[in-house]
């Protein structure tokens, strides 16, 4: 096991975030053959956006689609597990780009470790949080505090987790989060009031916890430019480009073949 | 020239996956390594690349359907030279899919066509390989393909690096995986042979044991992991850390889970095996003539099944919530199969109440052999209702077995030993066997367990009773 490169990306459009993940997954797969051992943990600050994972059979909106556009919310159809969710300011979004070759090729174990990271963070700020059997994610006081949805390509993970630190939770009212009817989202801020931590503090703790849980020898914070440079030195795939399997779309149409 | 696309192994606890999205339509051409389909398990979505160049011939399992790991979900019509080997694997994976389908009858779609229609080469093919535990798809990488078109999994490549195995050597190994792939076990077997034959002492990661030279049983061949070749050389390290294999980790987790959830209790009885010994002696040659090796296990299975019908509370499981007993009105009897360093596995024989002794004997032969060769189908290790473990084959005269949770009881059978016993006031010598029952005291009271075990023993002592209670 090796180094985990943690990156605070700063403001990042969802589209750019996808592009970077895709490129780093490719770089990770290719690097594996050369014996590279460094994985990535990306923390983007996304503007408000809705994403729909592969569990979704239909769009679980509580409002007409037109209302989304009015609020400037783009919808992305993505190849992660799970259903619909919201990302935006005040939420800690983490994308682990991890080579499961070194982590035992066990998807469920990886999921459980991500959950454990979320539980570690909750516990650190004295929030009583727990798993709910059959519902991946973390729950506190009956409401959902963190969501998890992962994608895997060639045994390299992408997408990841979203922990509500201090977001405006009202956008969640537009959807049935995770496709679960009647689910209410909560946040550390709602649970802790003025005692809630800053996003950056939770980010630091998340990186430490994940590095520990997944057994990395070293956690290293690197600049966003470093991640982009790594992405750019990996040439784009030819035919399908960055659209393979996950394509941003204005609606929910499948990518053109 | 058809290549099966199956749900790959995605983790120890991952038994099934849902087809979340077909990225290609039937008739689409696809290149090797090009994303073909996505499978979701829990909240992870996995992209499965195409195993070869070709055309997507049929989609067997539609989007949104959940199927077991190893199930065929689609068929690729291969193109070019690599197609011959995969076609040999196609019928086997298809039959595995069909066999596992009943277990999920509601969920799994029937195969679009019988295997023979998309595997015309089947008759000419060598004995077909069942689905390998090594996933064909996500493992694929540029360097992972041999010149002859066989893929290598990351696990295999890791061992190759560690043990300095060349591609040429790998190419010489007859693979047992899908399309003749060399699996981890194939490679470890090969390394064991290479280690034994060659002077290099290069070893597979086995269980080196300093005890090996001290075991004074030259008559019986030592299991491979105890052979002297595995002992450290003089002056070598006195300890060695051997990472758990996947199977070992799974066993460890299951055992701890069993001990933490079930309220384990044991009781013991004994049976005079004279009648069974005589029956076995008489029937062994007859079954042998039909290619069936008769052991004592079929008698234990039959007696246990009959006793379970009478004491039905022993046959079932505790509900996942731990608040209800789920009685099973079928009798899938698990048998613990030891496999040296490969680790214990407990496949079960289905519907033992509807099979006669000869049928059960044949199935025991078959399932034990395939368990040792890692050739079990997924459904064969699922949905057991009761288990039997025979520690007697290794010489034990008694044991306190761990329940194969979520089942509620396990019977231990042991070595049959001639010893003096008192019958009708006379000391006589009889072939005696101790029997034990491990039960979950949450749901099974001692009274029930003792009565059940006594019933099994009396059925073994008086097998003619089988006529009257069967």
Image (cartoon, coloured by chain):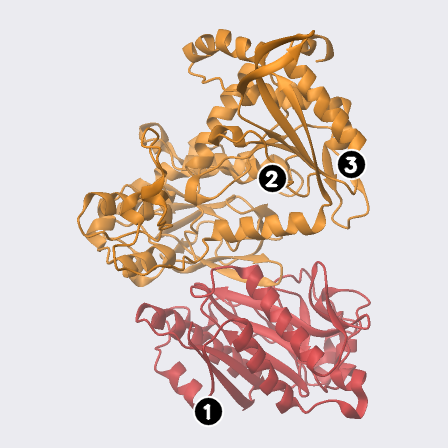
Chain colours: A red, B orange
> Circle 3 marks a residue in which chain?
B
Q: CA distance from mark 2 to mark 1?
A: 49 Å
Horizontal and vertical percent position of residue B350 = 61, 28
Residue B5 % position (x, y): 45, 47
| Residue A153 sits above or below residue B167 on the image | below
Q: Residues within 10 Å of mark 1 (few under 14, many from 20)?
A: few
Please determine whether, in this image, residue A178 is positioned above or below residue A205: above
Mark 3, residue position: B444
Residue on which disc 1 sits: A223
The secondary structure type at the circle numbered 3 is loop
Coordinates of residue A52 in the picture (x, y in percent): 64, 69
Q: Residue at x 35, y 35 (%)?
A: B216
Q: CA distance from mark 1 to mark 3?
A: 61 Å
Which percent across, then down, holds residue B34?
40, 60
Quick check: can you spot residue B79? no
Which comes sooner in the sequence, label 2 or label 3? 2
B419 or A52, which is in the foreground?
B419
Judge by depth and name the residue closer to the eye, B38 or A209: A209
Residue where numbered disc 2 is placed = B382
């Amino acid at each position: 096991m090796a180094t985990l490169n943690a990156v605070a990306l700063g403001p990042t459009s969802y589209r750019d975030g996808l592009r970077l993940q895709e490129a780093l997954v490719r770089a990770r797969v290719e690097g594996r053959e050369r014996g590279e051992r460094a994985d990535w943990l990306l923390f983007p600050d996304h503007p408000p956006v809705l994403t729909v994972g592969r569990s979704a059979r239909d769009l679980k909106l509580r409002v007409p689609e037109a209302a989304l556009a009015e609020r400037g919310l783009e919808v992305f159809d993505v190849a992660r597990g799970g259903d619909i969710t919201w990302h935006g300011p005040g939420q800690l979004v983490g994308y682990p780009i991890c080579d499961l070759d070194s982590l035992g090729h066990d998807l469920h174990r990886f999921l459980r470790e991500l959950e454990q990271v979320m539980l570690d963070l909750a516990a650190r700020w004295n929030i009583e949080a727990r798993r709910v059997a059959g519902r991946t994610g973390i729950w506190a006081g009956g409401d959902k505090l963190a969501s998890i949805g992962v994608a895997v390509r060639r045994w390299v993970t992408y997408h990841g987790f979203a922990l509500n630190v201090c977001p405006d939770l009202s956008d969640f009212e537009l959807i049935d989060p995770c496709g679960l009817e009647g689910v209410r989202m909560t946040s550390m801020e709602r649970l802790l009031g003025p005692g809630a931590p800053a996003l950056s503090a939770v980010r630091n703790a998340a990186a430490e916890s994940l590095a520990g849980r997944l057994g990395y020898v070293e956690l290293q914070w690197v600049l966003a430019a470093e991640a982009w440079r790594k992405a750019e030195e990996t040439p784009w795939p030819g035919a399908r480009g960055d659209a393979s399997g996950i394509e941003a779309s204005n609606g929910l149409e499948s990518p053109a073949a | 020239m058809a290549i099966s696309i199956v749900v790959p192994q995605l983790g120890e606890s991952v038994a099934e996956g849902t087809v979340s999205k077909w990225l290609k339509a039937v008739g689409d051409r696809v290149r090797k390594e090009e994303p073909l389909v996505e499978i979701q398990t829990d909240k992870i979505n996995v992209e499965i690349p195409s195993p070869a160049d070709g055309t997507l011939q049929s989609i067997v399992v539609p989007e949104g359907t959940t199927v077991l790991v190893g199930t065929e979900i689609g068929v690729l019509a291969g193109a070019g030279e690599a197609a011959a080997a995969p076609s040999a694997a196609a019928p086997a994976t298809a039959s595995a899919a069909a066999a596992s389908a009943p277990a999920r009858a509601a969920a799994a779609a029937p195969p679009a066509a019988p295997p023979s229609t998309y595997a015309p080469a089947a008759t000419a093919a060598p004995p077909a390989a069942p689905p390998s535990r090594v996933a064909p798809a996500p493992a694929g990488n540029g360097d992972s393909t041999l010149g002859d078109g066989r893929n290598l999994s990351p696990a295999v490549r890791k061992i190759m690096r560690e043990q300095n195995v060349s591609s040429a050597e790998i190419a010489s190994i007859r693979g047992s995986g899908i399309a003749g792939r060399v699996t981890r076990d194939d490679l470890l077997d090969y390394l064991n042979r290479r280690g034994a034959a060659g002077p290099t002492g290069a070893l597979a990661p086995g269980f080196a044991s300093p005890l090996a030279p001290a075991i004074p049983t030259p008559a019986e061949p030592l299991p491979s992991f105890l052979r002297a070749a595995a002992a450290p050389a003089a002056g070598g390290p006195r300890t060695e850390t051997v990472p758990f294999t996947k199977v070992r980790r799974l066993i460890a987790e299951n055992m701890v889970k069993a001990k933490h959830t079930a309220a384990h209790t044991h009781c013991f009885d004994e049976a005079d095996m004279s009648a069974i010994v005589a029956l076995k002696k008489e029937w062994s040659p007859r079954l042998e003539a039909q290619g069936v090796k008769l052991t004592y296990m079929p008698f234990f299975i039959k007696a246990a099944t009959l006793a379970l019908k009478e004491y039905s509370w022993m046959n079932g499981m505790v509900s996942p919530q731990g608040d209800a007993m789920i009685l099973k009105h079928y009798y899938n009897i698990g048998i613990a199969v030891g496999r040296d360093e490969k680790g214990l596995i407990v496949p079960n024989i289905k519907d033992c109440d509807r099979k006669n002794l000869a049928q059960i004997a044949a199935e025991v032969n078959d399932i034990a052999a395939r368990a040792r060769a890692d050739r079990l189908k997924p459904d064969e290790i699922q949905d057991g209702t009761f288990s039997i473990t025979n520690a007697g084959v290794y010489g034990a005269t008694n044991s306190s077995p761990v329940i194969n949770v979520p089942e509620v009881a396990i019977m231990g059978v042991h070595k049959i030993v001639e010893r003096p016993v008192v019958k009708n006031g006379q000391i006589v010598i009889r072939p005696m066997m101790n029997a034990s029952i491990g039960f979950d005291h949450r749901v099974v009271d001692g009274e029930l367990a003792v009565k059940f075990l006594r019933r099994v023993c009396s059925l073994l002592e008086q097998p003619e009773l089988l006529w009257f209670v069967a």
